[in-house]
Image: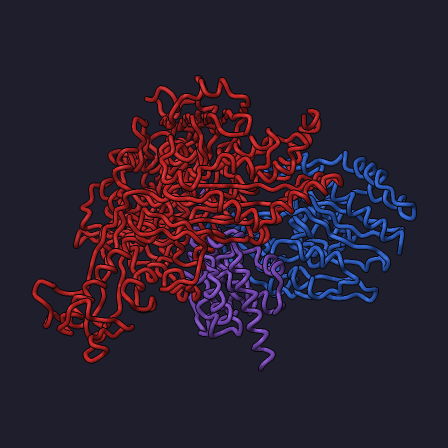
Chain colours: A blue, B red, C purple
Amino acid sequence: MIPAPFNYERPNSPEAALALLTATPDAAFLAGGHSLLTRLKRREERPPLVIDLSGTGLDKIQTTDDGGLIVGAMVSQAELVNAVSEADWTLLKNTGFSAGDPMIRHRGTIVGAMCEADPRGDWAATALALDASVELLLVNSGRHSITYADYLTAPPSEAHLVLSTSLPAQPKNAVQSYSKVKHIAVGWAVASAAIVMSPDHVRIALSGALDAPQRVPTLEQAVVDMVSKTPDAQAVKAVISEALSGLHWQGDRYAPADYRAHRMAVLLEDVISDHLKLLTFS
Amino acid sequence: MSKTLYQGEVKEPDGWVGKALPRMEDSKLLQGQGQYVDDITLPGQLHAVFLRSPHPHADITSIDVSVAESMEGVMACLTGDDFSNTSPIKPNWVLPRAIAKGRPPIAQGRVRYVGEPVVVVIAKSEALARDAADLVKVDYAPLPFVLDQDEALEANAPRLHEDMASNEAALFAPGNGGFDDAAGQAPHRFQFSLRNQRLIPFPIEGRCVNADYEVSTGRMTLYIGHQLPHMIRRMMSEAIDFPENKLRVVSPDVGGGFGAKMHFYQEELIAAIASIKLGRPVKWTERRDEHVAATTHGRDHTMDVDVAVDEDGKFIALRVDSRANIGAYMSSMGSGIPTVNVGLFVMGVYAIPHVEARIRCVYTNTTPVDAYRGAGRPEASYVIERTIDRIGHELGLDPAEIRRRNFLKDDELPRRQPTGAMLDTGRYHHTLAEVVAQSDYEAFRLKQSDTRASGRLLGQGISNYTETCGIGPGQIQAYVGFDRGGYESARVRMLSDGRAVVYSGSHSHGQGHVTTYAQIAADELGVSPDLIEVIQGDTDAVPQGIGTFNSRSVVVGGSAVKVASSRIAERINVLAAHLLQAKQDEVSRNGDVFSVNDGEKSVTLREICKVAWNGHNVPFDFGIGLEETEFYHPKSMSAPYGAHVAQVEIDPRTGELSLDRYVAVDDCGRVINPLLARGQVHGGLAQGIGQALYEDGTPLENGSTPLEPSIPRFDMVPKYESSHTVTESWTNPLGAKGLGEAGTIAAPSAIVNAAIDALWHLGVRELEMPLTPARILAAIEQAQSSGGAK
Amino acid sequence: MSTPKHAQPEQLSVTLKLDGQMQTQPVDARDLLVTALRSEFGATAPHIGCESGRCGACAVLVDGAPVKSCMMLAVQADGAEVITARGLAEETPEGKALQSAFQEHHALQCGYCTPGMLSSAIGLLRTNLSPSDDDVRQALRGNLCRCTGYEHIIEAVISAAASLSQEGQSA
C-alpha cells in the first residue's frame, strides 16, 4: 500500500495549479485525498506529479446576497456542515451526518466528492437535489460556470480545475431530507435519496445503487402532481415503481442489485409519503 | 480432586483472585508505547515484499526478475527455484490417516490459491521493494479451479494435488453408531442443511516478522507477533534445521490474534532463510490486502443434519454429515479444527442415545482455513443448537422447553459423551433458568404474539453452548495427531526485595495475562499484584512453554502460576520458621510480617527473601533462593458452557434485522477477574454477532477474497448484558474453565435461532449466515410464494 | 511493464510540532503521514491497520482534529501540530481523563487500535461533553476494534466526559 513515486507541488493559486496540470500530462489534483490516495496506494494510478490544492485559496465558504452558498474546492465536509444553519440547509446537515465518519468528513471535501461522484457516495446526490452548479477554471477558456448535472453528464474535454460549487438558496417552504440505507460495514449507501420538496419545486436525487448518482425527473413530476392532493400510499408506490423501473442498479454480495432496487423503492415510499403529509398539513 | 466445588454466582472474593482489577499492562499501551513487531527496526534493516498469485489455480510459465534485481537498493529477488530444496511447511495437527499437503515456502511451478507467494523481493526499504516487485514479470497458464468443498468432492472436479485420488484430505467419524436402526423407528425425523461461512480473522495488527541472523555468533532472533513463541521456535528450527538453542523468538506486544497468529506461515520461513542468506535483518509487514488473502481463514463448513426424536421431543438419534473446506494446503491445525473440534461437540449439552458424525476435510483453490476464535466449537454449537430449535418449532414446543427435556442432568456429570467430549461439571437447567429470567424471555413471548397481528416480526433465540478448552492432556493430543505439548510453564521467582517475577510460557495477545497471573500469584505469595511482574513472549527468558489458544491461558497457564507460586510460599514459610527458630505451625503471618509468640520475635518477608538469596543463613538442604518452575500438565480439559438469548425484530418490508437485546450467562467456573472476563465475553460476542449478521469471507467468483469482510463497527453491535453462573471445574487447581471463545461459540446460533423464531410462522425454515437483509427478505418472499407455513 | 517515469522518489523536508517538540525530517513526496511519523519521526504510537482509511488505528490529532494519518501525505502536514497517543496526556486537556477511563473500564485489550481510538474520542469530547451511548457509537464508527466488542470503550468515553465536565464546573 505504498504509492508509486511521484513529485509534489503545492501551488499558491488556481491558475498556477492548472498550469502545472497542463505542463505535466497525467498529473493529479489532491484535495481531501480520500479517493485519490486510495487509488495511488493501490497503484491503480501512477501520476508523475501530485498537485496539492491546499495553498490555492479555495478554502472559503461565501454566502450570496440571496442566501445561496459558494463552497470552495478545499472546504471540508465538516467545515461546510458546521457553517450552515439547520433551518436553511437541512439537506447538507443530514448528508454530513451520514457520510463516512467524523475523520473522513474532516478531511474529505464536498467538491472532491462531487467530482468523484461515486455511485455509492452521498454528496453528489445532495448537490444534484440542491441544483448545484460548479465554477470551473478551464485551461483555454478561463472561468466558466455550468450546472453540476451538466458537469456530470458532459464534463468539459479541456483540462480544468473545479474552483467551487454554488448552492442556490432553496425555496423557503421546502422540506429537505437526506435518507440513507447504509452499507453498514463500509459506510457507503445501499440506497439513498436527497430530496428538496415544496409544492411547486421537487428535486429527488438518488445514490447508492445506480451507475451514478442522478435525479429522477419522472418521479419529481409525479410528486409535483400529488402535492396538495390527499396523500395516497398506493399512488405513491405506483409512481415510484414506475419511475424506478427504467434505472440500472449495481449490486454486491451484501446488497445485490435487485435488493437495492427494492430497498430504494421502500425508502422513497416512506420519505415521500412523509414529505407529502408535511406539505399538505403545513 | 478432593476439594469442594463452589457452585453459585460471582461473589466478593477473599483474596486477589476474583477482584475486578484494572489491567497493569495498560499504561504503556494507552500512551502508544507498546512495542509491536513493526515498531522494531534494526540496524541494517532490510524489507521483504511478496508478489502473490492473482490466480486461484495456474501453472507458472515464466518468471523474469532481471529488471527488478538490477534496481539500486534491491538485495534479492527469490522465486520457487531458490526454495526447491526447502520442504513444504509441515502441519502441526495431522489427523490420523489424513493426507497432509503443506504449503511450499514459495509456489513451486504451480499456484493453488489467490495470494500464494510467487516471488519475494528484498530491498533496503519497503517502498523500494514494492517498486521492484512491480517490475517482476510472471506469466501464468490458468487451470480449472474449484472454490467450494462440495463441488471439490465431485468426481470430475479439478484436482488440487495430482498425486491424490480425490480432494478429500481427511475423514473423522466419531459417535457410537446405531443411527439407522434407531431413527428408522422414530415418530419424528427431520433433515436439513446448515452452513458456517468462511470468515477472516482480521486482527487490527496484521502479521509481522523480523528475522535477524547474526553471522558472527550463528544465532538468530525472530521477532514475530505470535500466540505460541516456543512452538514457532520449534517449528522454525525443524523447518530449516536451525539449532534450536541458537534460535530466540521474541513476541512483544501482539495486536490481536484470534487463532490466525499461531501458525507457521511461508513469510516467516522466507524471512529467516533470507536473513541467513544476506546476513542482515529481514522484516515483512503484512498489508491488509495480504491479510485477507494470505493469512488463514476460519470456518467454511457445510453440514447435513438428520435427527430423530420421540413424541416428547426427546432425542433418539442424530447424524451429522459435513464437509470442511480447508483450502489449497493443510495449514497447521487445518485437519484438526473442523474434525475433532467439531465432531466431539455436536451433541452439545444433551443426552442423545445414538450419534454418528462424518466429517470430511476437502482441498480447494482457496486460502488455507484454520483455527479462528472458537475453532470448531462454533460450528458444533451451531449444528446442535440450531437442530434443537428446529425440533422445538416442528413439534410446537418452546425452544426453552425442548432444551429442558433433553439436557444432561447435573448429576450425570462428569460424563464422556459418545462422541468423546468430556463434560466435567455443569448445571444446564440452572443456567438456562438464569438467562430466561434475565432476558424477560416469557414476557418477550407474549409481546411477540401480541404484535404479530400488526405484522411485526419479533423473535428470540437461545444458545446453550458448550465446548471443552484448556488443552492437553498431551496423551489425548498424541491420539488425535496434534503434535504440540499440552502443558504450560510458569517460573516464579521472588527477589531479595520481596517482589516477584512470573515467567509464563503462555502469551497474551490482549487477554491480560500480566494482570490475571499477578492476581493468581499474589494470593499464593501473600503480596499485592503490583509487586509482581509478568514476563512472556521471549524464549530466552521464559522456560519452555506452549502458548495461548483454546481458551487455555487461565486454566493451564494460570494453574502453572498457582502451583509454582504455592511452592515458593511453602519455602517462605519454611525459611521464616528457620529464622524465627520455631516450628512452622508456630509461625503466624500478618501481611509482610512473620512472627511467633504474639509478635515477640518477628521477621519481614523482605528479610526472608534477602536471606534466601544471599544464602548465608539457610539450612543447607533448603538450597538457594525462591524460585520454582512448574510445567503444569492437565489430566483433563474443562467444559465451560452457558446460555445466551438474542432478541430481534425483523422489518418485513426490507428484511433488516435489529438485534435489540443480547443476554449472555456464561459459566466458566471460577472467575479470576470479572472485569477482564467481561471483556472476553464482549469481544467474543462481537465476533459471533459478526458471523451471524455481517461477515463473509467467501471468495469471489474469480477466487479472490473480498477486501472488506464487514468487521463489526461501533454502531453494528448492541449493548451486551453479561453475567456468570459459577460451577467450578475439578480439572485444575483454580476451579476455572476457559472463557475467551464463548461469545463466538454461542452468538451465531442464538441470533439465527431468533431470526427463524421471528419468521417460522411465515414458513421460513432455514437462513444462511450472514443474515443480510437481502437474504432475509428473499427467504420471506420465497416462503410466502410457496404457500407459507403448513 | 514499463519502468516508472520517476524512479527516484522526490525528497522533501517536513517540520512538525510533534507531541510538543519541533522536529524536521526528510520525507518522500509519496510518504503517507503515518509512514513518515513511524519511520522518520520515530513516533510509533499511530499504528498501521488497513492503510485505506477504514480502521482508524493510525488516527492522530493534526492541528487539534483527529485525522486518519494514512489518508494524508506527510508533506501535507508540514508546519502542523501533530499529537499522538504519546503526547495526549501532556498536550491535550482531555488526554489524561480518557487514558484513566480506558484503563478503569478495561476499554483496551491488545492495545493496537487504542492510540487511534483515543484521538477520535478527543474529537468527540471537544464538541460534546455529555455524549450518549449512540453519540459515541457514531463519533467513533471510523475506528475498528476487534477485541473489546466496543462496549467498554463506550463506557470509558462517557465516563471521561463526565469527569471532564465535572472538572470544568468546579474550575
Pick whichever, A115 or C157, lies toward us: C157
Where in the figure is residue C150, as x and y percent of width and height? 52, 56
Pick whichever, A96 or B516, lies toward us: B516
* Residue drawn at 73 percent across, 64 percent down: A84
On screen, residue C60 versus residue B369, left or right, reads right
On screen, residue C104 versus residue B554, left or right, reads right
In the image, is residue A206 above or below residue B170? below
Res B784 seen here: yes
* Residue drawn at 42 percent across, 30 percent down: B140
* Residue drawn at 66 percent across, 51 percent down: A115
On screen, residue B621 versus residue B539, left or right, reads left
Quarter occupied by residue B334: top left
In the image, is residue B253 above or below residue B152? below
Where in the figure is residue B437, as x and y percent of width and height? 57, 49
Res A118 seen here: no
Q: In which quarter of the image is the C terminus of chain B?
A: top right
Number of marks drawn = 0
Quarter occupied by residue B508: bottom left
Pick whichever, B11 or A108, lies toward us: B11
Pick whichever, B738 or B501, lies toward us: B738
In the image, is residue A253 above or below residue A180? above
**Furthest residue to the left?**
B620
**Furthest residue to the right?**
A229
* Residue drawn at 23 percent across, 66 percent down: B494
Where in the figure is residue B362, as x and y percent of width and height? 41, 27
Where in the figure is residue B200, as x and y percent of width and height? 47, 42
On screen, residue C134 versus residue B622, left or right, reads right
